[in-house]
Image (cartoon, coloured by chain):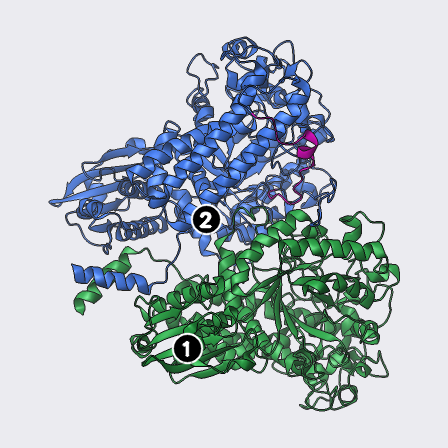
Chain colours: A green, B blue
């Protein structure tokens, strides 16, 4: 054995040290500890696969790669023997068919993993009704081993709760990414189809491993070129790469494409030439991509064209496109993120006002794709009032993985906690227990269709998401879209174990840090229901004083309503009455004195000296929250410092550096916000809490011309005079 | 031994297969073949390093990493023993000092590698007058081993011929790269200084390994924010990372910064407040970065501000900045790439006309940074007439590594052949043998200063340069800047051996492919002296018909002058007389009948039926060249196909895919160019050469709205109607 170790040592030295950089994501098949290898080796001796479909082949290849890496021994394809893993469908595999497994309720994507006996050998069977189901089951079995769960005596049947589990890439065709913080787009359209970057395949593996089964490839503020033949041909090549992984491609379509691309005079959905154009366009796409998923459409939103331009409803706009897609089984995701520059109504109310009356008017192959909240991906928002309010309409939940408003790359905020808060939200639409999960999985109203959409956080950065911990948001989104009942805690545990180490000292300290992280960012950015307080354009850092933007609802002052009396947006019946868009028990709660602190300033304008449940005044409570957030980031840094022994140098150091940035920026958020609000409250800082070290003018002058994520945003150089190095 | 192999096999399996992706560049310290390990192990038993400077430590660390990887055994720091490698300077190392080595002529950067005996032990000494020299020597010793050159009986003294060896990054502060084809900028300014990406260090290692000792970090079309205190603080953090590797940072400075940043009313170089502002700015930079390199300035060029705006000369503009830098030892690289929208003179003549009269007027710490040719980085250009024409001025040679005009990412063109053609060019300025090398190394006119500058091809792509073979251009640039007498062939051999394998079957076939590749691109793009024939804006693909751009000299027709009579730009005394800017023997050659074919259409307008040296008409010769280029790309593909056994899958496949793209685009260049020129020549295709498969309108309609490299270029969607997928 000592000779083996010596040889191993020499060989390891001979391989240049390659830093762990996060590229492997959670598909990190490094050798497990010896005890685990001893435990699992007998349960993964060979892969038995009958049939030869692309999906089955990638399942087999993934199992070979996973077992060989994790178990530290070569595991290959083989025959039935003790410990073999037998994969397939009854239709494709006589071995599986012979087992007469209960696959009836698994549908197209579910799988069954069962420990059984075949020809006298103890084997594990991964069976499904489709090869994609087999692939999902294969990833699940690998996860069992990666997370040291039992891999014997298994009888795991698993079916996705939500049918369409999609990422929306907001990638522009020039390679920039709207609200992207992980470098350049990974889609190198210039070289597609002639060169298909191996990263597309790695991304497909990662998506399939968590059940994501669709991606839209371009920014929802859509470039019509994406619909041109040149780009559809490129898209077809990408679809070929993704297809074995069960992933369909979708495109963000520009509503005015009939004019720009079709050279029609109008894009009016009621015009028959427009309907004919969409049909011709869609037929052309399906000739090239037979399993094309469909379109995402952002219409009449932030300058995008839409049906309102022709005095048509959102439903009429969606349906003309849906009708073109329907014969092919394609879907329209029609985004509910609309608000009008001409409508003085509280922005939080506008989408509901526009869409609710259209309930029942949308085609069956349309989803109204609704952001988790009525404003825009804030650190905390109450759930969007549309959930539960459109019983006759397919509603898709849209969440943002890219952390536009949550500190961007460098703040560690574990988003599945936020996603769960929304999913578990009780709309009371059909009485208590009418959660958002039940709305979007279709069970509340008996819809057959269901969808959940995440705005991608993927870019060309080596670790895919800019920060190591942002990978958890991608992972967690997929896991929750498959099963919204999973806990954020369980997902964090899985992800850490697969991505870093299963060492209990690591997992048991890092999971609570992740779970707490979401409330931490709320505390130091926008506590007590504050929202939309960020700086202009790039949304990086605080700007509660901003009041000079063209549209009132773009300005943070519109949302904080700070004045001599108090703080917060009165959305009770005495104010904008947005509360009335919720079911009566919810509306009552949010309009009254029992409103939870966390939503207080979202719905109510509260006096500075209002006595909070804690006994503090609002002012003191606000300061306490800001400072709690900063203190908690300090605790996160301490926790992470203690994790150094368990994590490789590169990933540990990057995370440590980012946490230091987070602490600095948390302080900036707190100081800038207090410096602004104290000009209204005129109240002293509570005891033990320091005043901001600078005056308001200092914070107002901080300016980042090139904060990432807003490629179309032209920096206004020297709007505030920058310092030169002599100052 | 079989047990060792078995153990090794198991261990290798246990490490997940990690594709070779080019990230390691030529610093690829994989285990050598057993015979080589046996040969070199006795010559690298330990590293002996006295002293503790940052540069010495990185030298030691590089040797440890290199030896351990290449030799497949742990090599560490140790004492003097047989086979030890002793590194250091006489000042820092008593061991080195005791050897009384002849270091006098090595200067600050040179090194001596000598096999000798120390305390009775056979050792290798790497000695220099500075720790940076030791680092350069360490890389040289590693290269000896990587390329299987002798590592014993050495007595190698080596001194750089050119003092300032710089890369110019044309990276914008928003992360895009002007003329960049390898993804996003690697400079993540948003996170600097709080997070320093490990890639900066890898880049520094790569640069130091080929002797590059300076980088300018931002686009020469300069953003004034780079000079602000916020960015200079960031730059200081980057300088700290690069300093141990002997690399100084430079900044592209905007000439109008005194107005934009300093809030002065003018940037007139004769205004004392302007001079004072530059002094204050520069003093501030040096307070933060004591070894700051200086500025690159693009003035009065393509819309950039400059001294002409105030009726001052280029020299007056350069000198006001140079005077601010001089007390700190800083340098101004003042670019000669100027041409005026108001000047109807042949663009090829304008820089000479403007700069030559200023010879002797520039401060000693100014370089006039001159592109290799008078137009703009074309596949082939005659050398810039300024070389040899400004004897009293420091001239720096600027070449472009980023392949703006040479097929961008996907064409395999080995640029050191082009660089050598320029370096070896005889200006005849002081008689025969007055090469560009002698002009820029200062030896022709006895200048103490010398500089060579490459426009960087580095980006965030995993392989750094977009294509595996583009790494050779970075490598070769550095090697030539260190020693312009190296042959392109020798550099290719080194690079291939270090980057791929030293297998003779591989090297002996791939070197000729690389060497030939430059003439190949000339043939299929712009044979016989044609130039500037590319499409608008992004410069991707052919556009010889383009005539609608605002300035005449932006249009390809300006350069090809195709008409009923013939083809080519008459720059003889009967035409623009640009030939007269060259020394008389050169001018005579280019104006006469003996002009080499390769420069023919650059200098002469030639009848379509002109009889060439080959006996062909010009028309036939042109077609023959285009087709020879395409055929040669076919041969390159065959060669590369045969190299498959010697190269890992990922790098082989990417290169194969790119060569296929190159062949397709070579055909496009040829067909489009012939389709245009035949509208003038009205001559039949020579026998055995096919007509273009489409008419001219087809080629004119090809349009790429998002070809990379021109981030500020707004696509004009649908200038030509794109097809929709139904067509």
Query: Which chain is mark 1 on?
Result: A
- Disc 2: CA contacts within 10 A as few (<14), some (14-19) or many (>=20): many
Give the extent of the magenta segment: B690-709
Picture quarter with the N terminus of chain B: bottom left
Name the chain letter of the residue that bears numbered label 2: B
In magenta segment, residue A171: no
In this orientation, does residue B380 appear?
Answer: no
Q: Quadrant of residue B656?
A: top left
Between the C-alphas of marks 2 and 1, the distance is 41 Å
Q: Looking at the magenta stretch, what is its main secondary structure?
A: loop
Judging by the rendered image, the residue that carries numbered circle 1 is A125
User: Among all residues in the image, which is located at the extreme right?
Assistant: A311
Residue at image coords 42%, 73%: A94
Position in image of residue A272 (x %, y %): 85, 57
Q: Residue at x 61, y 22 (%)?
A: B348
Q: Is residue A381 left or right of residue B9?
A: right
Q: Quadrant of residue B483?
A: top left
Q: Nearer the viewer, residue B446 or A428?
A: A428
Residue A336 in view in this figure: yes
């Amino acid at each position: 054995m000592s000779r083996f170790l010596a040889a191993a040592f020499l060989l390891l030295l001979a391989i240049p040290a390659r830093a762990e950089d996060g590229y492997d994501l959670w598909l990190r098949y490094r050798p497990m500890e010896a005890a685990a290898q001893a435990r699992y080796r007998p349960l993964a001796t060979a892969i038995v696969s009958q049939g030869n479909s692309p999906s089955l082949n990638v399942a087999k290849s993934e199992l070979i790669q996973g077992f060989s890496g994790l178990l530290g021994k070569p595991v290959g394809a083989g025959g039935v023997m003790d410990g073999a893993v037998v994969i397939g469908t009854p239709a494709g595999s006589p071995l599986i068919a012979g087992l007469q497994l209960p696959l009836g309720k698994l549908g197209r994507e579910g799988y069954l993993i069962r420990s059984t006996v075949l020809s006298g050998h103890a084997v594990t069977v991964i069976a499904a009704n489709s090869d994609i189901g087999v692939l999902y089951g294969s990833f699940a079995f690998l996860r069992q081993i990666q997370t040291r769960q039992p891999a014997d005596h298994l009888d795991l049947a698993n079916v996705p709760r939500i049918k369409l589990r999609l990422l929306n890439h907001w990638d522009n065709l020039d390679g920039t990414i709207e609200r992207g913080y992980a470098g350049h787009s990974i889609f190198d359209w210039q070289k597609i189809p002639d060169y298909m970057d191996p990263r597309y395949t790695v991304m497909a593996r990662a998506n399939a491993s968590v059940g994501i089964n669709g991606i839209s490839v371009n920014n929802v503020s859509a470039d019509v070129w994406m619909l041109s033949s040149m780009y559809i041909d490129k898209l077809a090549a990408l679809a070929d790469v993704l297809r074995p992984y069960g992933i369909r491609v979708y495109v963000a379509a520009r509503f005015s494409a009939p004019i720009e691309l079709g050279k029609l005079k109008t894009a009016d959905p009621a015009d028959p030439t427009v309907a004919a154009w969409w049909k011709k366009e869609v037929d052309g796409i399906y000739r090239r991509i037979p399993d094309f998923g469909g379109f995402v459409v952002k219409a009449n939103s932030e300058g995008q064209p839409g049906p309102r331009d022709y005095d048509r409803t959102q439903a009429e706009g969606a349906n003309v496109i849906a009708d073109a897609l329907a014969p092919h089984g394609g879907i329209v995701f029609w985004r509910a993120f609309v608000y009008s520059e001409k409508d003085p109504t509280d922005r939080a109310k506008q989408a509901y006002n526009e869409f609710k009356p259209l309930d029942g008017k949308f085609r069956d192959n349309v989803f109204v794709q609704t952001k988790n909240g009525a404003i825009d991906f804030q650190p905390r928002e109450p759930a969007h009032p549309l959930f539960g309010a459109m019983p006759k309409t397919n509603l898709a939940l849209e969440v943002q993985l890219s952390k536009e408003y949550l500190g961007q790359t460098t703040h560690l905020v574990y988003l599945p906690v936020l996603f769960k808060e929304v999913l578990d939200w009780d709309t009371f639409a059909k009485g208590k227990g009418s959660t958002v999960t039940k709305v979007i999985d279709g069970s509340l109203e008996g819809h057959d269709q269901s969808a959940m959409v995440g705005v991608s956080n993927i870019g060309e950065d080596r670790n895919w998401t800019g920060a190591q911990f942002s990978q958890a948001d991608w992972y967690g989104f997929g896991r929750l879209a498959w099963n919204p009942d999973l806990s954020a805690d369980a997902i964090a545990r899985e992800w850490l174990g697969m991505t870093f180490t299963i060492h209990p000292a690591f997992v048991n300290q890092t999971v609570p840090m992740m779970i707490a992280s979401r409330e931490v960012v709320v505390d130091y950015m926008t506590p007590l229901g504050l929202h939309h307080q960020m700086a202009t354009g790039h949304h990086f850092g605080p700007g509660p004083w901003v009041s000079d933007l063209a549209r009132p609802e773009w300005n943070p002052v519109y949302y904080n309503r700070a004045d001599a009396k108090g703080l917060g947006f009165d959305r009770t019946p005495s104010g904008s009455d947005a509360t009335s868009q919720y079911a009566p028990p919810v509306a009552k709660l949010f309009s009254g004195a029992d409103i939870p602190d966390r939503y207080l300033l979202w719905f109510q304008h509260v006096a500075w000296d209002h006595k909070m449940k804690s006994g503090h005044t609002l002012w003191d409570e606000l300061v306490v929250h800001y400072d709690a957030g900063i203190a908690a980031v300090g605790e996160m840094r301490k926790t992470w410092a203690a994790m150094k022994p368990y994590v490789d140098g590169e990933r540990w150091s990057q995370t440590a550096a980012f946490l230091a940035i987070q602490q600095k920026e948390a302080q900036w958020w707190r100081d800038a916000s207090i410096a602004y609000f104290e000009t209204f409250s005129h109240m002293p800082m509570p005891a033990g809490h320091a005043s901001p070290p600078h005056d308001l003018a200092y914070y107002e002058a901080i300016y980042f011309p090139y904060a990432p994520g807003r490629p179309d945003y032209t920096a206004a150089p020297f709007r505030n005079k920058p310092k030169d190095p002599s100052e």
